[in-house]
Structures are given as structure tokens and as C-alpha cells.
Image (tube, helix red, strand yellow):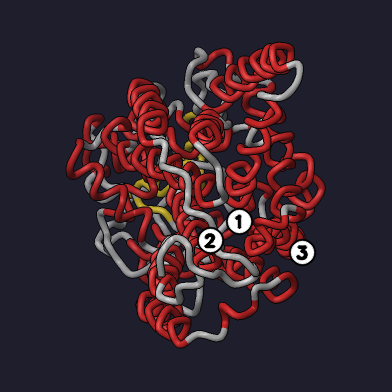
Amino acid sequence: MDETAVTPGKTAPSEVLPRFAAGPVAAVVLAQVAVLTALSGRYGFHRDELYFLAAGDRPAWGYVDQPPITPLLARAATELFGSTPAGLRVAATFCGAVTVVLVALVARELGGGRGAQTLAAAATALSAYVLVVTHMLSTNTADMLLWTAIAFLGLRLLRTGDGRWWLAIGAAVGVTFANKWLVLVLLAALGIALLVTGPRAVFVSGWMIGGVAIAAALMAPVLFWQAGHEFPMLTVAGGISAGDGPESRILFVPMQLVYLSPFLVPVWAAGLVRLWRDPDLRWARAYALSYPVACVILVLVGGKPYYALPLLLILLAAGAEPTVRWLAGSGRRLRRACAGVLAVLGIASSVVIGLPVLPASALAGPVLAVNRDQGEQLGWPELTATVARAWQRIPAERRRSAVILTGNYGQAGAIERFGAGFGLPRPYSNHMSYADWGPPPDTLTGPVLYVGKLRPEARAVFGGCERVAVQDNGLPNGEQGTDISLCAPPSAPWSRIWPRLRHFY
């Protein structure tokens, strides 16, 4: 169907879309890429990035706490651009740039002209959440891009009425499922919203069956892996919900106003109202309802507040056109002056919160309260050096049979990444998928250097432990104050005690 086809939910042909603002959007993307690239090597690897690198070195259809897409991105980026923070984060920068283009295309899909598309692109690139997840690689980095892609393809389907878009949607859903299962929340929210607001005709299509088949085919390997391992991701998700659920529910609504930027709330709020009220966008009304539906689902299951943020980018795109019109209205000089001041404040706060522009010593306080991931990019070589000094306390003849065991994947990832430079052997850990990559050989019957707080199950299998070092470099992250203990050899072969030591939290 062409751009003027009759669309579901509308009684008149849709208008030809505005031209894509290729020049201004490209300028935004180039500036975004330049800034992210310039700062990508500052600080260091995040603990999750160290884990992704370890997982990428052990490719599989799944891991206990995530599907394979993000570890594969980490592997590809470091193979192509170098095993450094800057090399790894090329993947995050790429995801951010494509997301900005997609948001501009969403604004165009909703009738936004050159100014609206440029505003949508710039606001997306400069929002705090987008800066956080595009500075470092995380599962949310890819999820943001993929959710935005699904939303854009859905808009194409609704506007044109061309059922062939179901095939692209199915492919996007399948790939997204291989990154994070949160896509099920997006599908539920959009599905419920479409059933309530229409156009319901999109569900009566043979192409939809094709899209579902494509999605199912792409999901199958991930589901089979999880089924073969007794669905550990559900265990991990249940633990996260139980541990963080109450706090997430309390903070859910306030953080919706903060994560993108408080200064962008009027823009995305205008987008929500526009999608709901504008008769010319009746075909897209479901997108106004899908965001609150997703929020309700996430609150019920104890999901984190930022899980719903990709849908806010769609509302931001929808609000760009009325914002441009408002800026061009009566008293536009005063309006633009006020908007300029707010933009400067918004950009400054987003950059400080989302990017590593402050000295490490200045992070404690409000910055870490909003974005604790800043601190998690610090101190990993220093922790490895502390472990190396403790390792040297073991007599040389006993080191050959000794084991380094860590309490979490960040510690194991750091020692695996930096340990060779300090003369350390491969570390082992019982945390998350690291437990699947062990145990140590039963021939290693020497002492155990345990990194982290000793868990009860660890105390039960070691003859005795003595704290020999404490990580203390003054950096504001989760490893400040980490204990390092020297323990007696395990009471039984590693292969026998390993299942007892495993933990997910």
C-alpha cells in the first residue's frame, strides 16, 4: 500500500508523510556519536560489562540471568574495536544512534515536520536515561533500541493497514526476546491498548500468523535452553522482584518524571494527550494507553521504573510537533527564551548524571543517588591489585593448588580481565552463570582465596577463614570495603560441593 492508503481506525486517506529531516537528524547523531566516543574510555568497565565480556567468551543460547544478544554484542564489539571500554562501547554508541533516528522517524510517522523530527532526535539523544544506557553496554541498551523499533513498525502497520508489517514486527520481537524477556510487557501493553481503543482490524490478518511464526522460530532456541536448565531466568527475576519490588513500586511514578529529564515531562505529556485526543491520530490512540498499561504491569510484578522508559520515547516523539507549534505561537520570543533556559538546565543535569564528566571523587551524593552505575565503572583494576597482594601471602608451593573464589560476577569478571597482568590464575565464582563455568578441578586441593563477604554456605565447606585484606581505595562503588579472606581447603572435592555453593543474588 502507498502512503495514501486507507488506514484502520480512520475514515479518510492518510496524508503523505512529511519529508524526513535527514540533515538535522544526521547532525544530532554525529554530535551524539562524537560525545559518546570521546567519553567512552573515561572511568572503566562497568561490573555488568565485565560479565558480558566473560559470557561472550563462552557463547551459548542463554545464561541463567539473560538471553544471548548482549553478550554477543560485547564479543563482536571487542573483536572488532579492541578489548577496552572504548572498544566495547562502540556497540552502545551504535544502539544509541539508531534509537535517535528511529525516534525521529516515529515523529515523522505521526505527522511531525522538520522541526518536530529534529526536536525529537535532540531530546532523545540528550535525555539522562539515553545517555546512561548508551555510554555503557547493558541489556537495556539493546532493549531501548529494539522496543523503539517494534513501536515504529507497529505505527507503520496501524497507519498503512499493510499486514506485511507483521512479518517485520515478528522478527523484531523474536530478536528482542533473545535480548530480554521484558518485550512480553511491551506486547501485553500494546495488545491490551489495541483491544480497548482499536483499530482491532489489525488482528484479523493472515500476515499476523506469519509474524507470530517468525517470532516463535527466533524465540525457540532461547526457550529450549532455558527449559533445559529449568528456567533459571525466572528464578533470577523472582529474586529481583522480591528484593527490589517494594522500593521499585514506591519510586515508580516519581522516577518516570526524572529518568528522561524533568524538563522533558511537558513534551512527552503533550504527546500522550495528542495521541489520545487528536482525531487525525485516532489510529495511533493505542500508544497513549500502552504506556500507563505497561506501568501498571510493571508495578504489579515489581519491575524497575526504567523498564517503561522506551515507551516514553514514543510519547516524546508524539509531543515534539505540539511543542514546536507552541514555541512558534504568540509571545514566541519569551517562550523560546524560557525553553532555552530549561533546555540548558536539562542538558547540564542529564550530562552530569549520565556521562563520566565528574572526577571520581565528586560522584558521591545526588549523582549516584540517581545513577549508581557511574560508581560501578570504577576501581576494578585496583580490586584486582588488592587480590594479587593477598594471593602473594600464600606460600609459592601452595599457590599451584590454590583457588581464587569470588562472591559475585563483577569480582570474577575483573580478575579474569585484569588478573593476568598481576600474575593471578583464572578466578571461579558461584554467582549467576559463572557457576556454570566452574567448578575448579578436583586436583586443586589447596587453600582458597575468597573475595567478598563470606556466605554461610561457603563457611560451611571451608575449614576456616581469616580476613587478610580489605579493598579500600575510597571509590564510591559496591566493592569499597570488600573483604578478602584466606580459607582452608574445602572439606570435599570441588565437584561435590559446587552445587551447594551456587547462588543467584
Question: The residue under label 1 is which amino acid type?
Answer: Pro
Q: Which mark is residue 456?
A: 1
Q: Which residue is mark 2?
A: 155
**Residue 422 vs residue 330: left or right?**
left
Residue pictured at 41% horizontal, 23% vertical: 43
Packing grade of label 1 (10 A; few <14, some 14-19, many >=20) is few
Q: Nearer the viewer, mark 1 or mark 3?
A: 3
153 is higher (above) or lower (below) than 375:
below
Q: Earlier in the sequence, mark 1 or mark 3?
A: 3
Q: Earlier in the sequence, mark 2 or mark 1?
A: 2
Question: The residue under label 3 is which amino acid type?
Answer: Leu
Quadrant for the C terminus, please.
bottom right
Q: Which residue is mark 3?
A: 300
Check contact, mark 2 vs mark 3: CB within 8 A.
Answer: no
Residue pictured at 74% horizontal, 57% vertical: 292
Q: Nearer the viewer, mark 2 or mark 3?
A: 2
The location of residue 189, given as percent across then percent down, is: 66, 66
Packing grade of label 3 (10 A; few <14, some 14-19, many >=20) is few
Work out whether residue 10 or residue 206 is closer to the camera in this orientation and state it.
Answer: 10
**Residue 254 vs residue 309: left or right?**
right
Residue furthest toward the front?
Answer: 12
